[in-house]
Image (spheres, rainbow, N blue to C red):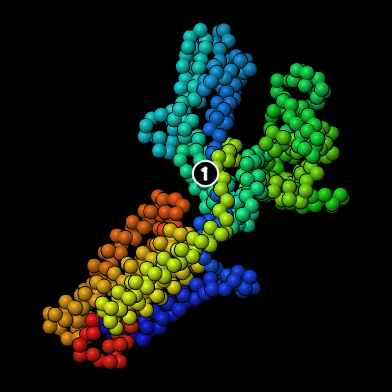
């Protein structure tokens, strides 16, 4: 056990050196590190509690999700009525969470019930085993049918909206160029966004507050806008206002969506070559390009509206068919407004509006205070451990202290390699790792003492101590690592920060205890050939 081949020694030292080198960029100012090659710029990112930043708690508009779910059901009812000639589709009306419809005379109620029941689907996901369905269909008699969205279906839709919102928020925040934002679900319908280093959250709030639901729809010319405002609105159209750049001009817009923002594959800010004004260029996928080309071919000479969150950005006239699958949006944008719109369109539309219910800005001064206190606690804790090990085990305690110091350096190296975020609980995880690291050495050294008392020679006792303590240390560290993994996957925010450093520390502890400490002891034995164990 004490014999270590030359290639193993080389591998151990090379591993230690390489991992520790990844921690070097943290010793230099960021301005210096930026001049290094890209692969060498990895460093630890300080969390919100250490460097300050923005903390925003968002709530998904549950009422909007419910309204959309019920309106979708009404549209489905109208489609079924139209396809099966059950009556007038316009007769489908919303009453709370229920869509009510009366079939025309002569229609078989059993046929209508069968067709409406096809709209009721079993719920999937974690609710699949409950047998719950999305819609309750009731024949109320006299040709009246009531279709009600079930509460489990609404709850599931809210859950899906939150999950979708998290993905879209993450894409939007990453487009800002911030480092390691923390975006996590909180409760049933809330999303917590923490962005370290962002001291002015106004632009972030503006990006997160927009649903960014983009649609392309035709302008209705059948009725003048002023007459429509007096109450003569066609049933398949609605009045929408233009943006501030359009002076809030009213437009009569068809409800039918020609192309939606879901068919966009890319959006980039740019400048109009003729006017040099900021614009946003966009590109559709195959489906969107086909529908857009068909719409522009059939409506040459008519204006079509580009609508973002029920606000008309612009309403240009179609001069010629647009068949290339791309186009541009202009609307008296500023450069930042064009860039923000491009970010929103690339990230996608939120499934429901988000409301900011809590906002905090953590100043860098508070973060610096946390760093100083955390660092002080880490130094004091580590110093006490070093003193204890040296006082208890003498020279072998020195070997353990050297291994622990390299262990901590390796933790910082791995964190840097992963570009991980270090939080105050993360520092606590590192301090706890120091204690666990020396605990492994304590088990080895106490085993060596037992072997010495049993009458073994110094070299045999040392060899047996490392060999027989291995199983115990592996068992304890594996179970501890499982606990850290559970904390990481189940916990959020500070808990995950603690779990990351703690888990990495366990891995490096096992490595240093059975390779580095053993290498130090084996080298000492080879040089000094001791007759007794100084422990």
Q: Is any atom of residue 494 visible in this view? A: yes
Q: Position of residue 245 (x, y in %)?
A: 79, 39
Q: Nearer the viewer, residue 437 or 276?
A: 437
Q: Residue at the spot x=49%, y=65% of the render?
A: 372
Q: In the current view of this chain or complex, which residue is farthest to the bottom?
A: 528
- Look at the picture and state if 132 lies above or below 212: above
Dividing the picture into quarters, in which one does residue 386 lie? bottom left
In this picture, residue 278 sits left or right of residue 473: right
- Residue at x-position 44% and y-position 30%: 152
Image quadrant of residue 409?
bottom left
Does residue 286 appear in this view?
no
The one nearer the camera, 111 or 62, is 62
- Residue extending farthest to the left is 454
Q: Secondary structure at mark 1?
A: strand
Position of 30 with respect to 24 (left or right) is right
**Residue wearing tag 1:** 191
Q: Picture coordinates of residue 516 (x, y %)?
A: 35, 78
Q: Residue 431 sits in which quadrant?
A: bottom left
The image position of residue 111, as x and y in percent, is: 50, 16
- Total numbered labels: 1
Locate the N terminus by quadrant: bottom left
Left or right of 490, for residue 28: right
Q: Residue at x 33, y 83 (%)?
A: 520
Neighbor class of circle 1 (other Cα within 10 Å; few <14, some 14-19, many 20+) is many
- In the rendering, at what x and y percent does residue 98 appear? 52, 20
* Residue 242 vertical position relative to residue 39 in the rendered view, above or below: above
- Position of the C terminus, as image quadrant, is bottom left
Q: As drawn, is 88 to the left or to the right of 130?
A: right
The residue depicted at 32 percent of the width and 87 percent of the height is 523
């Amino acid at each position: 056990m004490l014999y270590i081949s030359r290639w193993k020694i080389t591998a151990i030292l090379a591993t230690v050196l390489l991992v520790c080198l990844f921690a070097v960029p943290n010793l230099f100012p960021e301005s210096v590190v930026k001049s290094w090659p890209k692969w060498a710029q990895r460093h630890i990112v300080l969390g919100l509690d250490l460097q300050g930043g923005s903390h925003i708690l968002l709530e998904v508009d549950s009422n909007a999700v419910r309204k959309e779910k019920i309106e979708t059901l009404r549209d489905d009812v109208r489609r079924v009525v139209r396809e099966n000639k059950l009556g007038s589709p316009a007769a489908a009306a919303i009453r709370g969470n229920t869509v009510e419809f009366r079939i025309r005379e002569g229609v078989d109620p059993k046929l209508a019930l069968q067709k409406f029941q096809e709209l009721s689907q079993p719920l999937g996901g974690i609710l699949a085993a409950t047998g719950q369905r999305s819609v309750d269909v009731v024949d109320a008699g006299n040709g009246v049918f009531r279709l009600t969205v079930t509460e489990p279906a609404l709850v599931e839709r809210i859950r899906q909206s939150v999950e979708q919102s998290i993905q879209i928020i993450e894409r939007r925040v990453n487009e800002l160029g911030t480092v390691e934002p923390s975006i996590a679900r909180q409760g049933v319908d809330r999303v917590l966004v923490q962005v370290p280093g962002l001291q002015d959250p106004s632009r972030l709030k503006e990006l997160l507050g927009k649903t960014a639901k983009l649609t392309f729809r035709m302008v209705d010319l059948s009725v003048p806008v002023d007459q429509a405002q007096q109450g003569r609105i066609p049933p398949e159209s609605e009045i929408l206002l233009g943006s501030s750049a359009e002076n809030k001009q009213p437009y009569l817009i068809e409800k039918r969506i020609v192309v939606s923002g879901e068919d966009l594959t890319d959006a980039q800010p740019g400048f109009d070559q003729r006017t040099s004004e900021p614009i946003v260029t966009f590109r559709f996928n195959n489906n969107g390009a086909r529908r857009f080309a068909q719409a522009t071919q059939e409506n040459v000479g008519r204006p079509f509206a580009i609508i973002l969150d029920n606000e008309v950005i612009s309403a240009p006239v179609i001069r010629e068919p647009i068949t290339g699958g791309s186009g541009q949006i202009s609307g008296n944008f500023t450069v930042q407004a064009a860039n923000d719109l491009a970010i929103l369109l690339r990230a996608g539309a939120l499934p429901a509006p988000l409301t900011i219910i809590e906002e905090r800005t953590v100043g860098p001064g508070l973060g610096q205070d946390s760093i100083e206190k955390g660092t002080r606690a880490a130094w004091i804790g580590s110093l006490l451990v070093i003193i204890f090990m040296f006082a208890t085990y003498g020279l072998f305690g020195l070997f353990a202290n050297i291994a622990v110091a390299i262990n901590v350096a390796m933790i910082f190296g791995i964190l840097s390699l992963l570009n991980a975020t270090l939080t105050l609980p993360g520092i606590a995880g590192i301090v706890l790792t120091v204690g666990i690291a020396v605990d492994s050495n304590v088990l080895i050294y106490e085993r060596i003492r037992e072997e010495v008392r049993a009458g073994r020679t110094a070299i045999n006792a040392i060899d047996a101590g490392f060999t027989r303590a291995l199983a115990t240390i592996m068992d304890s560290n594996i179970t501890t690592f499982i606990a850290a993994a559970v904390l990481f996957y189940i916990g959020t925010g500070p808990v995950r920060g603690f779990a990351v450093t703690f888990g990495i520390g366990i891995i490096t502890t096992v490595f240093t205890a059975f390779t580095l400490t053993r290498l130090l002891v084996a080298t000492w034995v080879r040089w000094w050939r001791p007759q007794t164990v100084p422990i």
